Amino acid sequence: MAGRATPSKAAPGRTTLAAVPRPALVLGFAGLIPFLASALGVWTAGYPRSLIALDIQLAYGAVILSFMGAVHWGLAMAGGPGAMTFRRLGWSVVPALAGWLALLLNPAYGLILMAVGFAGVYFGDLRSIAADNTPAWYKALRKPLTIIVIAALVSSYGALVVGV
């Protein structure tokens, strides 16, 4: 069937990217393009265009952090009234607030906050997976995406430090 993942041959209890539904896999990795392109722009565009690339990266990062939190709001809604706890819903708005705050800060601090935010969301996702509130394949998708996003943000931070 279209869109269905093939079973993974990973060790029991572990999933691989092969277990991720194809639309989630393709769209997830496509979502890295703005992070990587803007990081490249921060390094190569030259002043003042590099600042525009930085603004683009921060704005996109804030949107994606919001999206990552919204995933958990949606999962709580799908879980029914018993799943709609202050803990789950409260956690789901934290990434949006972190992204918004990152936009208000000096860009260097904003990049740091955003990188910490993406790491925090990843660890929150791991807890959600362990509690069986999130599909097991989600970890296989989120790990490489999170690593690449954080690397792009840290790269841009490095460009600021170096003064490119």
Image (tube, rainbow, N blue to C red):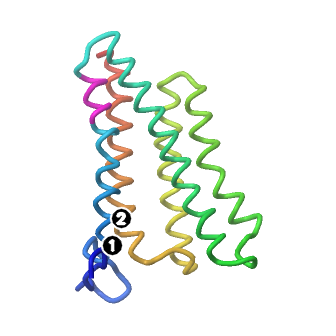
Rendered location of residue 56, percent (x, y): 41, 28
Category of crowding for the residue at label 1, using alpha-carbon neighbours closer than 10 angstroms: few (below 14), some (14–19), many (at least 20): some
Label 2 near label 1: C-beta < 8 Å? yes
Rendered location of residue 48, percent (x, y): 35, 10
- Magenta stretch: includes residue 98: no
Q: Amino acid type of disc 2?
A: Ala
Is residue 84 found left or right of 24 in the rendered image?
A: right
Q: Which residues are magenta?
A: 37-43
Residue 105 in which image quadrant: top right
Label 1 belongs to which residue? 21
Q: Among all residues in the image, which is located at the extreme top?
A: 47
Question: Foreground residue, 163 or 101?
Answer: 101
Under circle 2, the secondary element is helix
Q: Residue at x 46, y 42 (%)?
A: 115
- Measured in 3D between alpha carbons, the distance from the residue under mark 1 to the one under mark 2, in whole angstroms, is 6 Å
Rendered location of residue 134, percent (x, y): 52, 74
What label sits on residue 139 in the rendered view? none
Is residue 92 found left or right of 152 in the rendered image?
A: right
Rendered location of residue 34, percent (x, y): 33, 38
Magenta part mainly helix, strand or loop? Answer: helix
What label sits on residue 24 in the rendered view? 2
